[in-house]
Amino acid sequence: MEPIAAIKCVTDVEVVGRTPAFLEAHVLKSLEIIGAGSIGRGQLAKELRLGEGTIRTLVGRMKGLGLLSTSRGGMTLTESGLGVLSGFHGLLKSTEIPETTMTVDSKNYAVLVYGAAGVVRKGIEQRDAALMAGAKGATTLVCEEGRLIMPGMEDPFDPAVIEFIEDALKPSDGDVVIMGSSDDSFLAEIGAKTAALKLLE
């Protein structure tokens, strides 16, 4: 199953019956968490910060799509689920990043989106997507001629963080890096992933 289509199916309002209380970024993070090793529903709810009923809906949808299986030992990804997760590895790469003057708060998380530079205008859409997901903001960088730059600006203003991102994510020309920011590391991550997924639509 194509990665973006798979997570859209999990959050599909027509299938769920109402707007689900979780985001596409929660589905992506759940794939990452379950893919790292078997986990129980309660622990997954805690890690995703979702309520019992919400996690039941999320897991039920993922199971219905054949992305995961459940047993007494917990949940594991099926071959199809592993395929979707692997597909995302070809689209995105991510890391926590240090505090920086380039973002609006202390906790920051960067997601690289391969080859998405052509979709970015001024980064406002990415910021808005991150805000809707609960982050305090998002900063968008585009890789051009081997350098990460902010759309509309000459030079980023924190060389140390730019170097950190380049070492961790190794962007190439045409790639985009979105930095989600919050006073809460989880919300910074969910914001960055929400904005990144929006770019892939």
Image (tube, rainbow, N blue to C red):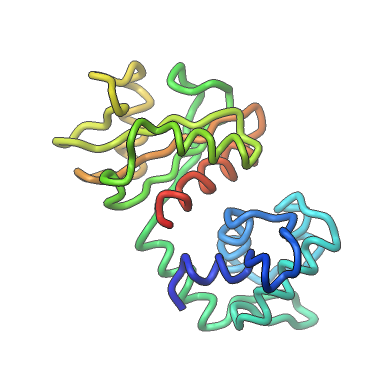
Question: In the image, 29: left or right of 113?
Answer: right
**x and y percentages locating residue 195 in the rendered image:** 49, 44
Residue drawn at the location 64% of the way across and 54% of the way down: 23
The C terminus sits in image quarter: bottom left
Q: Residue furthest right?
A: 52
Question: In the image, 178: left or right of 38?
Answer: left
| Quadrant of the image occupied by residue 132 | top right
**x and y percentages locating residue 10 in the rendered image:** 63, 69
- Please determine whether, in this image, residue 145 is positioned above or below residue 169: above
| Quadrant of the image occupied by residue 149 | top left
* Count of numbered badges drawn on the protein: 0
Residue drawn at the location 46% of the way across and 43% of the way down: 95
**x and y percentages locating residue 186 in the rendered image:** 64, 41
- Please determine whether, in this image, residue 142 is positioned above or below residue 92: above
**x and y percentages locating residue 2 in the rendered image:** 43, 73
- Please determine whether, in this image, residue 74 is positioned above or below residue 144: below
Residue drawn at the location 41% of the way across and 68% of the way down: 87
Residue drawn at the location 38% of the way across and 46% of the way down: 112
Question: In the image, 73: left or right of 136?
Answer: right
Which of the pair 29/1 is nearer the observer?
A: 1
- Please determine whether, in this image, residue 89 is positioned above or below residue 194: below
| Quadrant of the image occupied by residue 159 | top left
Q: Residue furthest left?
A: 145
